[in-house]
Image (cartoon, grey):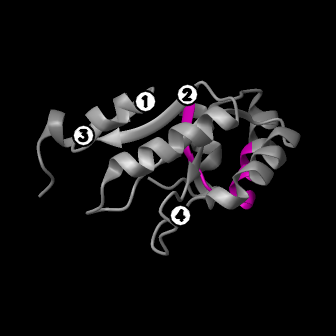
Amino acid sequence: GKLQTNKVKLALKIFDYIHSLDNQKLAKKIADEQVKQDKKPKIFIQVNIGNEDQKTGIPKEELTDFYMLCKNLNLNIIGTMCIPPNNENAENYFSKMDRINKELNFKDLSMGMSGDYLSAIENNATYLRIGSKIFGKRN
């Protein structure tokens, strides 16, 4: 889920990866904390690939500028992440993310969940978020 700025200190202590960098304030907080802890987590920028109001993430039109800001903050950005719109063909969004990731020359791409992971793999996802296939459906 979304990483809140007030949880960054704890998150950096226990996690090696952050899959949901979605705003400038959070990027700056991570940058400050990684210096204090002498730890550089591997980070994915969350892209709001469907331009959905209810989801966080960087709009794809702003991604390059946001990535440059992250590089200037000395963040270890290794790829992008997305959650496509619900009830739409995820394949279309996954192929867009694959192109975006390649344009930015990233090796890693975090996308795909239990219901669409095969399509995500076909579009070069390197990290999948599989929950209900392992643990069962949520109540």
Q: Residue at x 24, y 40 (%)?
A: 131
| Disc 1 residue crowd, few under 14, some 14–19, many 20+, Cα 10 Å | some
* Labels in figure, total: 4
CA separation, marks 2 and 3?
Answer: 20 Å
In the rendered image, which residue does mark 4 sit on?
A: 56
Mark 2 or mark 1, earlier in chain: 2
In the rendered image, which residue does mark 1 sit on?
A: 127
Mark 2 or mark 3, earlier in chain: 2
Q: Which of the two residues, 131 or 113, is positioned nearer the viewer here? A: 113
Q: Secondary structure at mark 2?
A: strand
In the rendered image, which residue does mark 3 sit on?
A: 131
In the rendered image, which residue does mark 2 sit on?
A: 108
CA separation, marks 3 and 1?
Answer: 13 Å
Magenta-colored span: 15-30
Asked whether the beta carbons under mark 2 and mark 4 sit within 8 Å of each other, the answer is: no
Return the x and y of residue 58 as percentages of the image width and height: 63, 58
Mark on residue 22?
Answer: none
* Picture quarter with the C terminus: bottom left
Q: Is residue 24 magenta?
A: yes
CA separation, marks 2 and 4?
Answer: 20 Å
The three-letter amino acid code for the residue at tag 2 is Asp
Relative horizontal placement of residue 38, taking residue 13 as reference (left or right): right
The three-letter amino acid code for the residue at tag 4 is Thr
CA separation, marks 4 and 3?
Answer: 21 Å
Single out the mark in the foreground, 3 or 1: 1
Instruction: Reply above or below: 4 against 37.
Output: below
Mark 4 or mark 1, earlier in chain: 4
Residue 53 visible somewhere in the drawing: yes
